[in-house]
Image (cartoon, rainbow, N blue to C red):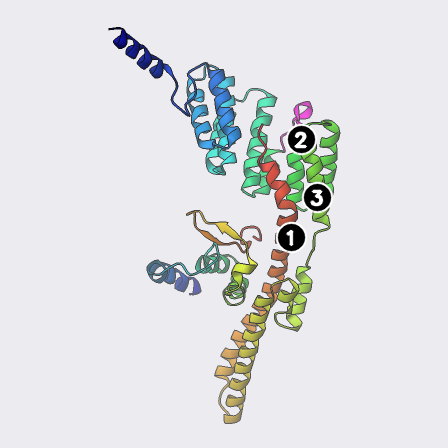
Amino acid sequence: MLLGWIGYYQRHIAVNSVQRCPFALSCSRYAQDRIGRLGLYGVLLFIDRYFYRETVFARQTYPYTVRPDGTMALDDGYLELE
Amino acid sequence: MTKACLLLAAVAVLWALPAEGQPAEGQPADREAFGRSLLGEGDYFRAITVFKELAFQAQTPEDRFRFRTLIGQGYRLSRRYDLAIQSLGLATVDAATDEQRDRVDLQLALVYLGMKLTPQAGLALSRPMGAAATPLRGLLRAVVAVDQGKTQEAKTELGLVRQGAPGSRVAEVAVDLDGAVRSLEAAPHRSPFLAAALSTVVPGAGQLYADHPVDGLQALLLLAALGTTSYVAWRWEYDDGRPYVWTGISWSITALFYGSNIVGAHRTAEMYNLRAREVTWGQARDRVLDLRF
């Protein structure tokens, strides 16, 4: 059900909105991937990212990386910490 | 008449001169040297164009192999890894000797290291080469070992490289890498399990320990608010003798956030170690990724 909500958000809300997530992999994609693969543990990881780590000070804590579309975003080690 | 002849001669001379930035027409060897010079300058895409022309016109499989490998190298250095793999795959078709296969393996390993695909880089270097193995192969194996956390194995490989090719450029890079490996061993470290344990006792303490104080403060405040809300819900339902519906909901949410705070502390410590590693090891690693051969 949670994944259904995330899919709905991605298809109908995110596409009509500006990019707000400062991280290279957006929070909705992160949640989709983590919850889809890890279940409840993925929910915990998503809460950690969305509620604890995504702060206005994130830019001072995380380094920048370049997204495939050439824009800059914060790298929270998502790929390396797989 | 004389003026017209002189004018025509001048036009002919100007016509024959190469345009600025264009290589002189010449033998493939001159074109190859021009391409290599462009590669050296970092003008990768023009170099790739030159090598593509040469590969298209190559008369022998050996020449075609050499130019395709250079195309792969150009793409690798410009970080177009997908195209580098494609070009090196084409070069493999013309690789006939152990030396040529070694060359492709090394380029592919560098591509995979650039993509941070360490297991694939290890696989590319795993072909038994015997006497044909170059010191560069040992150098790249050392990088793979460090990326996999096997610093002792890396130091052994680097020692062998230094002994195998004393005074060479590869040996110089091996000395640099050896220094970086030693710095890496002395780099600051945060235990993910200790961070998780600290956050279990005091929410946010693990994040603070892992040098993310704002995340820790946010976790502490949010859990304090959720805990208070849950307590108020329980008090209200207990005093009024209601069924504990809101208490159950609010405590469930609080439990999720509490668990997330512990998992997050563990992850934050891992991230701290990853960054510390990038600072001490990243630059040395990048020097290897920029190697040209």
User: Can residue B257 be seen at all in this image of the molecule?
Assistant: yes
- Residue at x-position 44% and y-position 47%: A68
Does residue B276 appear left or right of residue A36 in this picture? right
Most common secondary structure along the magenta stretch = loop
| Mark closest to the chain's N terminus, 3 or 2 | 2
- Chain bearing tag 2 is B
Q: Label for residue B170?
A: 2
- Chain bearing tag 3 is B
Looking at the rendering, the stretch of residues picked out in magenta corresponds to B126-134
Q: Label for residue B276?
A: 1
The kind of residue tagged 2 is Val
- Say which quarter of the image contains residue B167: top right
**Residue occupied by mark 3:** B181
As rendered, which of B15 and B99 lies closer to the eye? B15
Q: CA distance from mark 3 to mark 1?
A: 13 Å
B108 relative to A20, above or below: above
| Mark closest to the chain's N terminus, 3 or 1 | 3
Q: Is residue A37 magenta?
A: no
**Element type at marker 2?**
helix
- Chain bearing tag 1 is B
Mark 2 Cα shell of 10 Å, populated few (<14), some (14-19), many (≥20): many
